[in-house]
Image: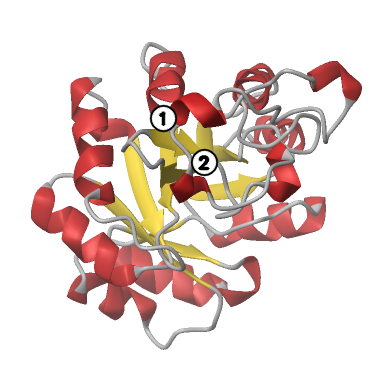
C-alpha cells in the first residue's frame, strides 16, 4: 500500500497561526509529509499564502488581500492574533513555502482561493512558480472553482489537481475524468469506503478534509484514502506509525 500523505492543514494550525512559516516549519517537525495552504494574489501580482479574502481575522487589517501590495501586506502581523509568542509572523509568499519544502520531499497542496474573488492569471503564476522550483511532481493544486482546475490542466497537463467539494457527489470519479482531475478533496463526511475503492479503480484518489478526530482518521485510513488533511499532523503521524502505513 502506498504511503498515505499526512497533509498539515494550513501548516500545524492547531498549535501555530495558520499559513505562516512558523506553522509550516512546525508541521514538518510534527511528522507531516504534506502541507496544505491557500494562495491569493496581491495588487502588484505577488502570490501570498492566506485563507480569507479579507485581512481582519488573521492580520488585523481592513479590506481585501487583492487591494494591498505585497510591501503593504509584509508589514502586517499575521501571528499575534494566535498568541503573543507569534507576534511578528508575516504573511508568507508561495516561494517561501516552496523553498522550505523543495529539498525535503514534502508534497504541497496549493488551494487556489479564486471562488469569491477572481484573480486573472493566478493559475499561470502558481504553475510558473512551481516549475521554477522544479516541484511539479510534488504539487497538487486544488480549488472549489472547478473551472480553474480545468484551466490549470490546459496550462500544464502534467500538473496534478484536486477537486474541493462539500456534498456527496454522484460518481465523483467520473466527474474528475471530465475535468481531468487527479484527486478528490472531499469534505470528510462525503467519503465512503466503496467510493474510495471505485475511485481507485478509475485512477482517482481521495484526500479528505479537515479530519481532526482520531476515530475519523482511523476510519479513513481503513477506507484506503491516499491522503488526509488535518490540523493535527502529529496525531495522524502517530496513527500511521502504529498501523505501519
Residue 241: x %, y % from top left: 67, 30
**Residue beneath disc 1:** 94
Residue at the farthest bottom position: 170
Name the residue rendered at 32%, 62% in the picture.
Answer: 204
The reply to whether callout 1 and callout 2 are in contact (CB within 8 Å) is yes
Secondary structure beneath disc 2?
Answer: strand
Left or right: residue 67 versus residue 235 is left
Residue 15: x %, y % from top left: 81, 31
The residues tagged by marks 1 and 2 sit, at their Cα atoms, a distance apart of 9 Å
Left or right: residue 123 versus residue 217 is left
Residue 85: x %, y % from top left: 86, 17
Left or right: residue 44 versus residue 86 is left
- Whether residue 129 is visible, yes or no, is yes
Name the residue rendered at 19%, 65% in the picture.
Answer: 180
Name the residue rendered at 65%, 36% in the picture.
Answer: 240
Q: Nearer the viewer, residue 38 or 67?
A: 67
User: Does residue 68 lie above or below 154 as drawn?
Assistant: above
**Residue beneath disc 2:** 37
Amino acid at each position: 500500500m502506498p504511503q498515505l500523505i499526512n497533509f498539515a492543514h494550513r501548516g500545524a494550525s492547531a498549535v501555530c497561526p495558520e499559513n505562516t512559516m512558523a506553522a509550516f516549519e512546525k508541521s514538518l517537525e510534527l511528522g507531516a509529509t504534506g502541507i496544505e495552504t491557500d494562495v491569493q494574489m496581491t495588487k502588484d501580482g505577488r502570490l501570498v499564502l492566506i485563507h480569507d479574502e479579507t485581512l481582519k481575522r488573521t492580520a488585523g487589517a481592513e479590506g481585501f488581500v487583492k487591494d494591498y501590495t505585497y510591501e503593504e501586506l509584509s508589514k502586517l502581523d499575521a501571528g499575534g492574533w494566535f498568541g503573543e509568542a507569534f507576534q511578528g509572523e508575516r504573511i508568507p509568499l508561495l516561494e517561501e513555502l516552496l523553498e522550505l519544502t523543495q529539498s525535503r520531499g514534502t508534497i504541497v497542496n496549493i488551494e487556489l482561493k479564486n471562488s469569491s474573488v477572481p484573480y486573472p492569471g493566478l493559475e499561470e503564476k502558481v504553475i510558473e512558480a512551481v516549475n521554477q522550483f522544479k516541484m511539479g511532481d510534488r504539487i497538487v493544486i486544488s480549488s472549489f472553482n472547478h473551472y480553474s482546475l480545468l484551466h490549470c490542466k490546459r496550462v500544464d497537463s502534467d500538473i496534478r489537481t484536486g477537486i474541493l467539494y462539500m456534498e456527496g457527489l454522484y460518481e465523483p470519479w467520473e466527474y474528475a475524468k471530465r475535468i481531468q482531475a487527479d484527486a478528490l478533496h472531499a469534505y470528510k463526511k462525503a467519503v465512503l469506503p466503496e467510493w474510495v475503492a471505485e475511485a481507485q479503480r478509475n485512477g482517482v484518489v481521495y484526500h479528505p478534509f479537515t479530519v481532526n478526530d482520531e476515530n475519523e482518521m482511523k476510519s479513513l485510513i481503513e477506507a484506503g484514502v491516499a491522503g488526509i488533511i488535518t490540523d493535527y499532523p502529529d496525531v495522524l503521524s502517530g496513527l500511521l506509525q502504529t498501523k505501519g502505513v
